[in-house]
Amino acid sequence: MPAGIMMIYAALGVWTGLLFIALKKGHFWRVALFGVSLMLVLNVGYFVNGAPNAIAFFVGIYDVLDNLGVDGAPALATCPGNNCSVWGDVYQNHPSWGVAFYDRFANGPASRTNLLYGHIAFNSIVFVLMHIQLAKPGGGANASLHKLLGRVSFACLTLGTLCALVLASQHGPVTSYGGSLSTFGFVFMSLCVYGCAVKGVLAIKRGDHDEHRIWMIRFIGAMWGAFWLFRIMLFLLGPLLRNWDSAAILTCIWFSAPLGILIAEWMRKRYARGNTANAQPA
Ligand code: HEM
């Protein structure tokens, strides 16, 4: 097994353990820190190794479960020389979205790869900054820092989402992504993420701090959905839905961001209830 893939599996195991502990204790900062760090390791790989190699690594994470117990399925496909995965000739079949993903950037125009780099860089910056914003809300001594980071985050989010939308507009002919359903799905994902951020910005412009916090927590949920939930769902759904080409990837594209918002909303209410229950009577 490639050493990098083994390390990712080990990291996912540790992360699952941290999640169980967090669910028991009600403190999620370790889970969040681990998720942000692992996101950075994966995404920085695009700039260190180049898009085709990083994509082959990404596809390699999915090859194991997708091939488990079968020698081919409608949602699996081959790629020339097995170059689309770091497993080399160990696996002859790969998730069909992975074959298309590799082909789009190994054999596509440089402008497309630059859009991907832009998308990854800007969205990764936002992913880090949004946690700093949550940890250091805008009251008191943090006010000017919070305001500055908020503006930087919103500008990066706008650029990162625009890059994603241009990339998604090219998905029509990519049948293993689901064609136009993938394009519309990514537009919907963008609306979920960007819509929450815009609502949060409008609320603070009105001076409504409570609404601002509520929408920004939803925004953080949408971002976690679009990045981590998407990739974890794809990991689990790939083998389950392999009899239907593009079913797993389309489910992730359409449902990851709204699910992220729902989870964030649930956590926000649960945490608020916990605080109320723990509050000492005056
Ligand atoms: C507004 C929400 C998002 C949308 C609409 C979106 C859309 C996309 C699209 C269209 C692609 C390229 C697929 C292709 O053209 O072949 C992509 C890939 C990618 N996106 Fe996003 N994305 C979103 C959020 C995020 C976030 C929050 C991050 C980082 C924290 C991120 C990081 C990546 C990465 C790293 C890839 C390459 C695949 C991988 O290695 O995971 N995206 N995204």
Image (cartoon, grey):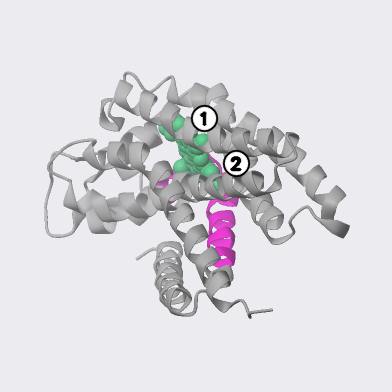
- Mark 1 sits near ligand 1, with its Cβ under 8 Å away: yes
* Percent of width and height locating residue 255: 34, 41
* Percent of width and height locating residue 230: 39, 47
Viewer can see residue 260: yes
Which of the numbered marks, if any, corresponds to residue 164? 1
Q: Along the line of sight, which residue is nearer the eye, 229 or 204?
A: 204
Instruction: Determine whether, in the image, residue 96 is placed left or right of residue 59.
Output: left
Q: Secondary structure at mark 1?
A: helix
Q: Residues within 10 Å of mark 2 (few under 14, many from 20)?
A: many
Q: Is residue 48 magenta?
A: yes
Residue type of the residue flagged with mark 1:
Ala
Q: Are marks 2 and 1 in contact (CB under 8 Å)?
A: yes
Q: Residues within 10 Å of mark 1 (few under 14, many from 20)?
A: many
Instruction: Determine whether, in the image, residue 248 is placed left or right of residue 219.
Output: left
At x 34%, y 19%, the residue is: 172
Viewer can see residue 30: no
Overall secondary structure of the magenta section: helix
For label 2, the residue is 123
Q: Secondary structure at mark 2?
A: helix
- Region in magenta: 32-58
